[in-house]
Amino acid sequence: MERVIGGYKETPSANPFGQCIPQDDIKNDLVKDPTLKDKLISFLKYTIFNQQAHAAGTTYYVSTTGNDLNSCSQATNPSTAKRTIQQGVNCAFAGDTVMVRGGTYVETVWIYNSGASGNPITVKAYPGETVTWRTASTDQTTSYGSGAINAVDQSYLRIEDFTFRGGRGRTVIFMWASNYRSVAPYVVGIEIINNT
């Protein structure tokens, strides 16, 4: 069986996970979330074209008065923060922290990078400030992708000091290992700390 994604043909033998996703499943996912294609393209562009030299232990700031057009380098300064948690998270790698300033954020965030043992990616509310975060999803029928935070096959993540309130999606935090056969990749090192 062969399928075409983004102009590239994929065969079962070329798939590193040893399985193909039926085309109907892909179509169903796109119907449920018509922005999924744009999210995937944006992620790939970021990953392939915009990775910069990176020092572990960097803090990136997000603020309701920020601007997502600010670069990751600029977002290390609180006065030139990113506007959305998603854009702050896109900057983070193992050992980094995404510090979210006070306010209400209505967004469904996908975490695409893993931390490492002893160096998680930390997403946390700014100390002393209240951050309310709720999913933008209103999907009550599926867990996948409906949480305020979604991560598939990502490990060593720390989510800290948020208030999750008012979301209408089915889940709040959705962490999932795509390989249901109990072989690598495993999802490990997930810390959910002091959230309400």
Image (cartoon, rainbow, N blue to C red):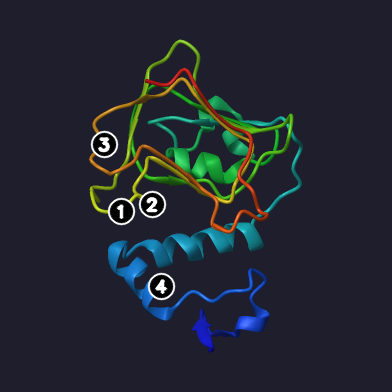
- Report whether residue 67 is seen: no
Dot 3 crowding, Cα within 10 Å, few <14, some 14–19, many 20+: many
Decide which of 158, 18 is in the foreground and name it: 18
The outermost residue toward the front is 181
Q: Which residue is mark 2?
A: 145
Decide which of 48, 140 is in the foreground and name it: 140
Secondary structure of residue under mark 2: loop
Q: CA distance from mark 4 to mark 3?
A: 26 Å
Q: Position of residue 91 (x, y in %)?
A: 60, 43
Secondary structure of residue under mark 1: loop
Secondary structure of residue under mark 3: loop
The outermost residue toward the bottom is 1
Question: Looking at the image, is 79 positioned above or below residue 110?
Answer: above
- Report whether residue 65 is seen: yes
Residue at 38% x, 52% y: name it. Answer: 145
Q: CA distance from mark 3 to mark 1?
A: 14 Å
Q: Position of residue 59 (x, y in %)?
A: 63, 29
Type of amino acid under label 1: Thr
Quick one: quadrant of the C terminus?
top left
Residue at 45% x, 38% y: name it. Answer: 85
Q: Which residue is mark 1?
A: 142
Q: Which residue is mark 3?
A: 167
